[in-house]
Amino acid sequence: MIVLHVKDLFKKLTLLFSYKKNKIDSLTENKFLEELCILLRHVGCRDQDLPNDKKATEYILKVQQISKLLEIKNINPIRRLKLLTKETNWLMEDLYHDCINYPKVIPYVKLLNGQPRIEIIRQEQEQRKLVQEQKYKEFLDTTAKDLIAIINKYIIDQTKKDELLRLLNNGYYRHLAVELDNIKESVDKEEETIINHFFADIF
């Protein structure tokens, strides 16, 4: 009876030890996987500044370090990365593998359709730039006409007048600003406002 009791106790202790060990291993695995997910989120949020962003590079190198630890511990992160993809709407498995292959590959995050998000960002930046350039051109065209009228009105010397118009047409606005400053005392309030507004936007 005593032998059976000891055997039963030993069996229970073995099961208990095994349970605690598995629980600890599980916690350790979750810790590594969640840390990996946090780092990948950081990379995804800063990828538009790669390859020159030092902070983004640090995150990538940490991803590589965790990847080696996961390999040593025989932990497969793919299941958690699939869930992370659903959480972010980014292809996190691709980002993970690109981080591992860095610097041979720059890890730009991809949308669910496979398009690198950096392409969309650059397209939007280019579009904004074109809109700004168009507005700036329209501003110059409109204000330049007013400046030409002021030059024609207050600059009597034809040579000087031609020089100011040349500066205006060629975009030498700083030189033009110095010359126009000399006639500010002669212009009326509306004309002074035109001059000030023009150079405030230029500089």
Image (cartoon, helix red, strand yellow):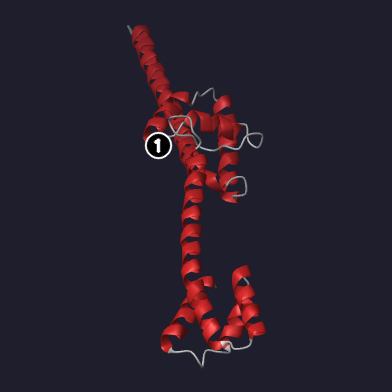
Residue furthest bottom as drawn: 185
* Depth order, front residue of 173/66: 173
**Label 1 packing within 10 angstroms: few (<14), some (14-19), many (20+):** few
* Depth order, front residue of 157/89: 157
**Residue at the image position 54 percent from the left and 82 percent from the top:** 152
Q: Is residue 105 above or below residue 143?
A: above
Please provide percent x and percent y for residue 186.
51, 92
Quarter occupied by residue 181: bottom right
Q: Amino acid at mark 1?
A: Thr
Please provide percent x and percent y for residue 52.
62, 49
**Residue at the image position 44 percent from the left and 82 percent from the top:** 193
Describe the element under mark 1 as helix, strand or loop. helix
Residue 170 seen from this side: yes
Please provide percent x and percent y for residue 84.
41, 32
Quarter occupied by residue 31: top left
* Residue marked by disc 1: 88
Q: Number of labelled discs?
A: 1
Please provide percent x and percent y for residue 196.
48, 80
Q: Is residue 165 left or right of residue 7?
A: right
Q: Is residue 20 above or below residue 90?
A: above
**Residue at the image position 52 percent from the left and 29 percent from the top:** 94
**Residue at the image position 47 percent from the left and 24 percent from the top:** 78
Query: Which of the image's four quarters has the C terminus?
Result: bottom right
Q: Is residue 105 above or below residue 135?
A: above
Query: Which of the image's four quarters has the N terminus?
Result: top left
Residue 39 seen from this side: no
